[in-house]
Image: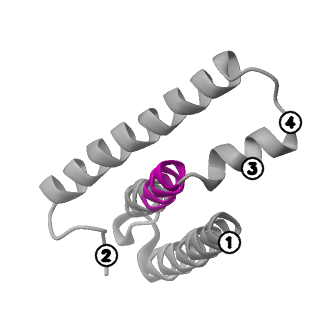
Amino acid sequence: MTSFGRSGLSDWLVQRVSGVIMLAFALVMVCKLGFGGELTYESWKAFFDGICMQVLTTATLLSLVAHGWIGMWAISTDYFTERLMGTKGTVIRLAFQAVCAVVLFTYLIWGLRILWS
């Protein structure tokens, strides 16, 4: 898989939708931190135990992974091209993409485990 979507248009759309989801999460967090009253462990836990917040957080984690993958793929194809670096560039690009994929997948699993356990 070279990019997240099947075309540049679908990648663009995934980037925009994931950006809106992450913005919604950020706004909810700003409201909670600004207007949520006293922040204690119990209130924070209760806030994230609600199904709406778990769904929003899951959507945000998935959006972060999709957004990150498309961004890192674009960076790697711009900077590690065969034109500029020959065959060595392809190897570096693929290694970079593999590391990014592993890191993003690890963050996703780790976040879901924390959220849903």
Q: Residue at x 16, y 70 (%)?
A: 6
Reading the chain from its start, which is encountered first: label 3 or label 4?
Answer: 4
Q: Amino acid at mark 3?
A: Lys
User: The magenta stretch spans which residues?
Assistant: 51-62
Q: Residue at x 44, y 62 (%)?
A: 62
Reading the chain from its start, which is encountered first: label 4 or label 1?
Answer: 4
Residue under label 1: 110
Is residue 50 within the magenta segment?
A: no
Reading the chain from its start, which is encountered first: label 4 or label 2?
Answer: 2
Please tell me whether residue 16 is drawn above or below residue 33 in the rendered image.
Answer: below
Q: Is label 3 in a helix, a strand or a loop?
A: helix
Question: Residue 100 location in percent, x, y?
Answer: 56, 70
**Viewed as shown, does residue 30 lie left or right of 74?**
right
Please tell me whether residue 1 is drawn above or below residue 39 in the rendered image.
Answer: below
**Viewed as shown, does residue 92 lie left or right of 11?**
right
Reading the chain from its start, which is encountered first: label 2 or label 3?
Answer: 2
* Viewer-proximal residue among 73 and 92: 73
Q: Amino acid at mark 4?
A: Thr
Separation of disc 4 and disc 2 at Cα?
A: 44 Å
Separation of disc 3 and disc 4 at Cα?
A: 8 Å
Q: Which mark is residue 40?
A: 4
Residue under label 2: 2
Callout in the foreground (1, 2): 1
Reading the chain from its start, which is encountered first: label 1 or label 3?
Answer: 3
Q: Which mark is residue 45?
A: 3
Q: Amino acid at mark 2?
A: Thr
Q: Main secondary structure of the magenta part?
A: helix
Separation of disc 4 and disc 1 at Cα?
A: 23 Å
Question: Residue 7 location in percent, x, y?
Answer: 14, 64
* Viewer-proximal residue among 92 and 86: 92
Reading the chain from its start, which is encountered first: label 1 or label 2?
Answer: 2
